Amino acid sequence: MKKYAKKPWPTKDAMIQVYENNLWGGDKTEFYSGMGSHDREVVHRYIKVVLAFLKELKKSPVVCDLGCGDFNVGKKLVPFTKEYKAIDIVPDLIARNKKTFRIDNITFYTLDIAKDELPTGDCAIVRQVLQHLSNSEIKAIVGKLYRFKYVVLTEHLPEVAFEPNTDIISGQGIRLKKQSGVDLLAAPFHFKVKEAKQLLSIPSPGFKGRIVTTLYRVF
């Protein structure tokens, strides 16, 4: 993988290092987005509930995958969408995805979802991304989520009741070590939605806590 001499944004710097150093596992010659993207049971059950939701819609949606990673999950959703816009902050990762996944209705973007303008779409998928970001970055992203009709959010959360949204520095780790997790409906985010419906809650493979997927219908 290419080494970057200059990494101007802290979050971009952190995510590049994750993939350069295989901090989420995988072979040193490949991009690997962790067990949450590769554990067979986790991926199968996630795909099942998200596809059920997509099939309920009257028209095939335009989906924006905000933090698409190595695309091991997203590739399974593409056939059920009108258009799939896959976004990640790591340039080499997106370059690899463009070469690997040559499908007509996919477009890959290198963007910082907290700082950059997002592509338009009907549904945003944000899968185990916000858990790695600071509260200030999450707040910036939440303001952009109102542009979508639907948001499918997946987060790694503690097993038991917890104090939500303890702030962290963006990087490899998540709030679980602080007995916390991301709750967009709670302070300081106060994400206003028409409906919130939990689609899935399963044990995290190899780690404490649960991986929870929630569908938000936005005003």
Image (cartoon, rainbow, N blue to C red):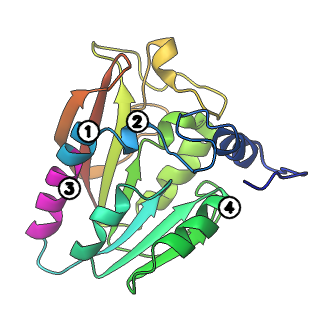
Distance of label 3 from label 2 (alpha carbons): 18 Å
Q: Residues within 10 Å of mark 1 (few under 14, many from 20)?
A: some
Distance of label 1 from label 4 (alpha carbons): 26 Å
Q: Are marks 1 and 2 in contact (CB under 8 Å)?
A: yes
Q: Quadrant of the C terminus?
A: bottom left
* Residue 65 forms part of the magenta stretch: no
| Type of amino acid at the residue the image marks with label 3 | Val
| Type of amino acid at the residue the image marks with label 4 | Asp
Q: Which residue is mark 3?
A: 50
Prevalent SS, magenta region:
helix
In primary-sequence order, the first of circles 1 and 2 is 2
Which residue is farthest right?
5
Q: Are marks 4 and 3 in contact (CB under 8 Å)?
A: no
Q: What residue appears at the point 55 percent right and 74 percent down from the top-left corner? A: 98
Distance of label 1 from label 2 (alpha carbons): 8 Å
Q: Which residue is mark 4?
A: 92
* Residue 48 forms part of the magenta stretch: yes
Q: Are marks 3 and 2 in contact (CB under 8 Å)?
A: no
Q: Which residue is mark 1?
A: 42
In primary-sequence order, the first of circles 4 and 2 is 2
Q: What residue appears at the point 66 percent right and 56 percent down from the top-left corner? A: 90
Q: Residues within 10 Å of mark 4 (few under 14, many from 20)?
A: some
In primary-sequence order, the first of circles 3 and 2 is 2
Q: Which residues are magenta?
A: 46-56
Distance of label 1 from label 3 (alpha carbons): 12 Å
Which mark is on residue 35? 2
In primary-sequence order, the first of circles 1 and 3 is 1
Please provide percent x and percent y for residue 182.
Answer: 42, 31
| Numbered disc 3: secondary structure | helix
Q: Is residue 167 left or right of residue 158?
A: right
Q: Residues within 10 Å of mark 3 (few under 14, many from 20)?
A: some
Please provide percent x and percent y for residue 144.
Answer: 49, 60
